[in-house]
Image (cartoon, rainbow, N blue to C red):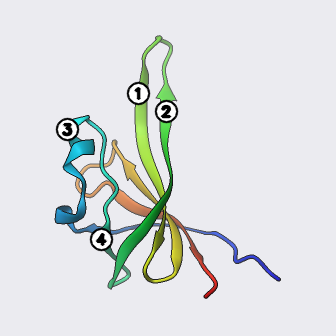
Amino acid sequence: MEIPREEFVSEPIIVDSSSVSLASLAQGAPGCPMRFTWREQEHNVVAILETAKQLRAYDSRETYVKSHSFRVRTDTNLEMVLRCDRQVRGNPWRVFTVRQLDG
Protein backbone atom coordinates (compact mmCIF):
# COMPACT_ATOMS: atom_id res chain seq x y z
CA MET A 1 0.00 0.00 0.00
CA GLU A 2 1.47 3.34 -1.05
CA ILE A 3 1.36 6.21 1.45
CA PRO A 4 0.28 9.46 -0.22
CA ARG A 5 3.13 11.93 -0.47
CA GLU A 6 3.04 15.27 1.28
CA GLU A 7 3.28 18.02 -1.33
CA PHE A 8 4.86 21.42 -0.69
CA VAL A 9 2.51 24.16 -1.95
CA SER A 10 3.01 27.36 0.13
CA GLU A 11 -0.16 29.03 -1.17
CA PRO A 12 -2.27 31.68 0.58
CA ILE A 13 -5.60 30.86 2.18
CA ILE A 14 -8.57 33.06 3.03
CA VAL A 15 -9.31 32.60 6.72
CA ASP A 16 -12.86 32.86 8.06
CA SER A 17 -12.01 35.12 10.99
CA SER A 18 -15.12 34.01 12.91
CA SER A 19 -13.63 30.49 13.07
CA VAL A 20 -10.45 31.53 14.95
CA SER A 21 -10.22 31.01 18.72
CA LEU A 22 -9.94 34.30 20.59
CA ALA A 23 -8.25 32.58 23.56
CA SER A 24 -5.04 32.04 21.57
CA LEU A 25 -5.09 35.59 20.27
CA ALA A 26 -5.36 36.92 23.83
CA GLN A 27 -2.09 35.12 24.62
CA GLY A 28 -0.32 36.71 21.66
CA ALA A 29 -0.37 33.65 19.40
CA PRO A 30 -2.56 33.01 16.38
CA GLY A 31 -5.38 30.52 16.76
CA CYS A 32 -5.77 27.82 14.16
CA PRO A 33 -8.46 28.80 11.65
CA MET A 34 -11.19 26.17 11.75
CA ARG A 35 -12.65 27.28 8.38
CA PHE A 36 -10.82 28.68 5.37
CA THR A 37 -10.86 28.85 1.59
CA TRP A 38 -8.04 27.47 -0.53
CA ARG A 39 -8.07 27.14 -4.32
CA GLU A 40 -11.66 28.45 -4.31
CA GLN A 41 -12.89 25.57 -2.08
CA GLU A 42 -14.02 25.87 1.53
CA HIS A 43 -12.30 23.58 4.03
CA ASN A 44 -13.34 22.89 7.63
CA VAL A 45 -10.82 21.62 10.15
CA VAL A 46 -12.07 18.44 11.83
CA ALA A 47 -8.91 17.81 13.89
CA ILE A 48 -5.74 19.63 14.89
CA LEU A 49 -3.09 16.92 14.84
CA GLU A 50 -0.01 18.92 15.82
CA THR A 51 1.10 22.46 16.60
CA ALA A 52 4.59 23.93 16.33
CA LYS A 53 6.51 27.19 16.48
CA GLN A 54 9.45 28.03 14.30
CA LEU A 55 11.97 30.18 16.15
CA ARG A 56 14.49 32.56 14.75
CA ALA A 57 17.35 33.03 17.18
CA TYR A 58 19.65 36.01 17.27
CA ASP A 59 22.92 36.57 19.07
CA SER A 60 21.02 37.50 22.24
CA ARG A 61 19.31 35.22 24.75
CA GLU A 62 15.92 36.23 23.42
CA THR A 63 14.25 34.16 20.73
CA TYR A 64 11.70 35.42 18.27
CA VAL A 65 8.80 33.28 17.04
CA LYS A 66 9.01 33.47 13.27
CA SER A 67 5.90 31.41 12.49
CA HIS A 68 3.25 29.11 13.94
CA SER A 69 2.22 25.87 12.23
CA PHE A 70 -0.83 23.66 12.62
CA ARG A 71 -1.05 20.16 11.11
CA VAL A 72 -4.76 19.62 10.51
CA ARG A 73 -7.21 17.18 8.95
CA THR A 74 -10.08 18.69 6.97
CA ASP A 75 -13.58 17.64 5.98
CA THR A 76 -12.30 17.52 2.39
CA ASN A 77 -10.12 14.50 3.28
CA LEU A 78 -6.84 16.40 3.29
CA GLU A 79 -4.04 16.62 5.80
CA MET A 80 -2.50 20.07 5.68
CA VAL A 81 0.08 22.14 7.45
CA LEU A 82 -1.26 25.65 7.87
CA ARG A 83 1.37 28.25 8.65
CA CYS A 84 1.06 31.78 10.00
CA ASP A 85 4.24 33.74 9.26
CA ARG A 86 4.61 36.73 11.58
CA GLN A 87 6.88 38.56 9.13
CA VAL A 88 4.37 38.66 6.27
CA ARG A 89 2.35 41.84 5.90
CA GLY A 90 -1.26 41.52 4.84
CA ASN A 91 -2.41 37.89 4.89
CA PRO A 92 0.13 35.81 6.87
CA TRP A 93 -1.73 32.47 6.43
CA ARG A 94 -0.67 29.80 3.93
CA VAL A 95 -1.18 26.13 3.19
CA PHE A 96 2.42 25.01 3.59
CA THR A 97 1.99 21.34 2.69
CA VAL A 98 -0.93 19.14 1.69
CA ARG A 99 -1.55 15.41 1.46
CA GLN A 100 -4.64 13.54 0.21
CA LEU A 101 -5.91 11.00 2.74
CA ASP A 102 -7.46 7.64 1.86
CA GLY A 103 -11.16 7.09 2.34
* Cα–Cα gap, marks 3 and 2: 20 Å
Nearer the camera: disc 1 or disc 3: 3
What residue appears at the point 19 percent right and 62 percent down from the top-left corner?
Answer: 17
**Left or right: 37 with respect to 100?**
left
Q: Does label 3 or label 2 sit earlier along the sequence? A: 3
The correct choice, above or below, for 82 with respect to 66 in the image is below
Quarter assignment of residue 97: bottom right
* Total numbered labels placed on residues in the image: 4
Q: Position of 3 compared to 56: left or right?
A: right
| Residue at mark 4 | 35
The amino acid beneath tag 3 is Ala
Considering the image in quadrants, where does the C terminus appear? Answer: bottom right
Q: Position of residue 18 (x, y in %)?
A: 16, 64
Q: Amino acid at mark 2?
A: Leu
**Circle nearer the N terminus (4, 1):** 4
Residue that carries the numbered disc 3 in the rendered image: 26
Of discs 4 and 1, which sits in the foreground?
A: 4
**Nearest to viewer (mark 2 / mark 4):** 4
Percent position of residue 69, x then y? 46, 50
From mark 2 to mark 1, how far is it between C-alphas?
6 Å
Residue type beneath disc 1: Tyr
The residue singled out by tag 2 in the image is: 55
Q: CA distance from mark 2 to mark 4?
A: 26 Å
Q: Given contact means CB atoms under 8 Å apart, are the residues at marks 2 and 4 in contact? A: no
Question: In the displayed image of the protein, which residue is found farthest to the left?
Answer: 18
* Foreground label between 3 and 2: 3
Q: Mark 1 — residue? A: 64
Q: Label 3 to label 4, Cα distance in Å?
A: 20 Å
